[in-house]
Amino acid sequence: MSALSFSQQVDALDLVAAWLGPWLRDDGMPCPVGDKPAVRGLGPTLRSAWDWPDTPTPTIILEGGPDGWTYRVSEQLRDRFAEIGIHTEPWSSYALCLYPIRVTEGSVPS
């Protein structure tokens, strides 16, 4: 299981929803989150133990979102994710995996 807290996962979901807002909403507000909006392509949902990468991994999923959204949000919000202790990996065009930032002695979090 992930070393990320549920609170960290929700914080990441909120960051993604705010980033997607201008792409998915006319008013630019954060898009809705959860299973119902995700099924309709209106906003992302969180799977705390999505097992596509073979290991249960917290993942933000949105099928039918803007092209390449996982890659762009991962790059553009890298510092914001790091502030909450998360490293992201675009697993596909619709799934953004979340991992804890591991800090070892003498290293600086990236």
Image: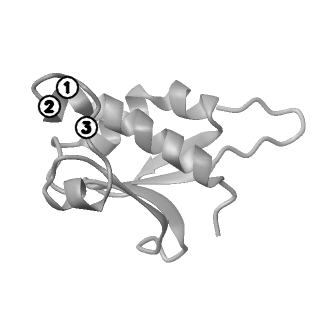
Secondary structure at badge 2 equals loop
Give the labeled residue for mark 1.
22
Give the labeled residue for mark 2.
25
Q: In the rendered image, is residue 74 in sight?
A: no
* Disc 2 + disc 1, Cβ < 8 Å: yes
Secondary structure at badge 3 equals loop
Q: Which three-letter amino acid code belongs to the residue tagged 1?
A: Pro
* Disc 3 + disc 1, Cβ < 8 Å: no
Front-most of 104 and 66? Answer: 66
Secondary structure at badge 1 equals helix
Q: Is residue 28 above or below residue 62?
A: above
* Image quadrant where one finds the C terminus: top right
The residue drawn where x is 65% and y is 53% is 4
Q: CA distance from mark 3 to mark 2?
A: 7 Å
Q: Is residue 19 above or below residue 98?
A: above
Q: Residue furthest right?
A: 105
